[in-house]
Amino acid sequence: MVKKIIAAVIVTTVIAFAVTGVLGLWIVKCEKFLETTEVTLELDLPKNGTFNQFYDRVFTYLNTPPYFREYLIHVKKADRRIKYGYYRAENMLLRDYLENIFKGTQSTLKITIPEGYNIHDIASVLEKANIISAEDFLKTALDDEFIFRLTGIPAPTIEGFLYPDTYFFPPYTKADYVIRTMYANFLNNLPYDFAERAEEKGLTFYQALILASIVQKETYIDEEAKTVASVFYNRLKKRMRLQADPTIIYGKYAEFDGNIRKEDIRDGENPYNTYVIRGLPPTPISNPDRQSLEAAAYPAETDYLFFVARQDRTHVFTKTYDEHRRQVYLHQIKRGQK
């Protein structure tokens, strides 16, 4: 009887060792697969996605070891560790890629916001990049309570405070995070004495920002920014209308078809129409870069009251209306007749 028990124990032990050995080899093989396999793929895991969906997307076309799915579930606990989000890999080890997914370390998408883009332009860029819907972004960008908490300024729009630059955001980024990131960049590029310089010029901080946004839209050559700013300051001092075409466009942005007509110039219903209103429009019309912000803070000292664009997008600056009319004829009317 004792011999039988001893024999049974030996058999059981041998089987246990054999099973353990097989399991060990299986685990080693699966681990080696993770550590030697590189993947290039883009994965967008939804909040309510299943482990099976994840597995099919990543491993269907890979030559996995036997029972690799079970390894992920029982050894790696992958079915409980997956975090939704956007994950991109380019020749990345499968082990590192899975760790990113388990930790929720999402990949980012690169977007570039050009100088002078307004919030509608930015919303479109964000939506096309699949970072956030234009509707959700604009809802926060026009939330006056959020804007006041962020900037301390009672503004109806975040327009003007979003610095044009290249950014990296993951998909599904919340609008307030995008705006806070761009606003922080705005503060980093704002001249340190912007508020003081605005006050010296008889403007509030927000008014100077509005002026900078107009300078941005009227300037194609950085070197001209301070001269363009001087024209607007000179017109403000003389209580002349600014007569800046980009303000008209901004006021009718949704329906603007690329042409400014006479009725647009005469439109008294457009609160941004600086051919009708005196002074500055109610809000910025774009998001200016550092060059335009500095121009608003440190305009050139000139007597210019007018400017007109040449064909090469530089400007001719003039002091009198007669000079201006002559330059308009030379650079726009006469050119158009050729």
Image (cartoon, rainbow, N blue to C red):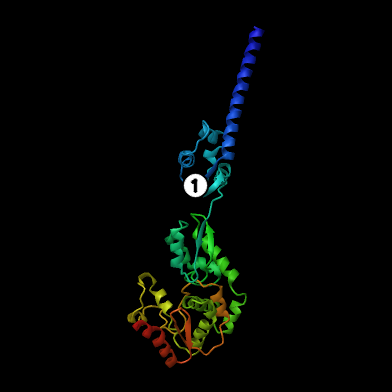
Quarter of the image containing the N terminus?
top right
Q: Height in image: 152 above or below 318?
A: above
Q: Which residue is mark 1?
A: 41
The picture places residue 32, in percent across and down from the top left corner, at 59, 36
- Answer with the quarter of the image where residue 330 lies: bottom left
Q: Amino acid at mark 1?
A: Leu
Query: Residue 250, percent across and down?
Result: 42, 74
Please identify the quadrant where the C terminus is shown: bottom left
* Residue for point 55% across, 71% down: 152
| Residue 15 seen in render | yes
Q: Quadrant of residue 197?
A: bottom right
Q: Is residue 182 left or right of residue 330?
A: right
- Viewer-proximal residue, 197 or 17? 17
Q: Nearer the viewer, residue 203 or 250?
A: 250
| In the rendered image, the vertical position of residue 219 relative to residue 34, given as above or below | below
- Residue 293 image position (x, y, % from top left): 55, 76
User: Would you say residue 75 is visible in this rendering?
Assistant: no
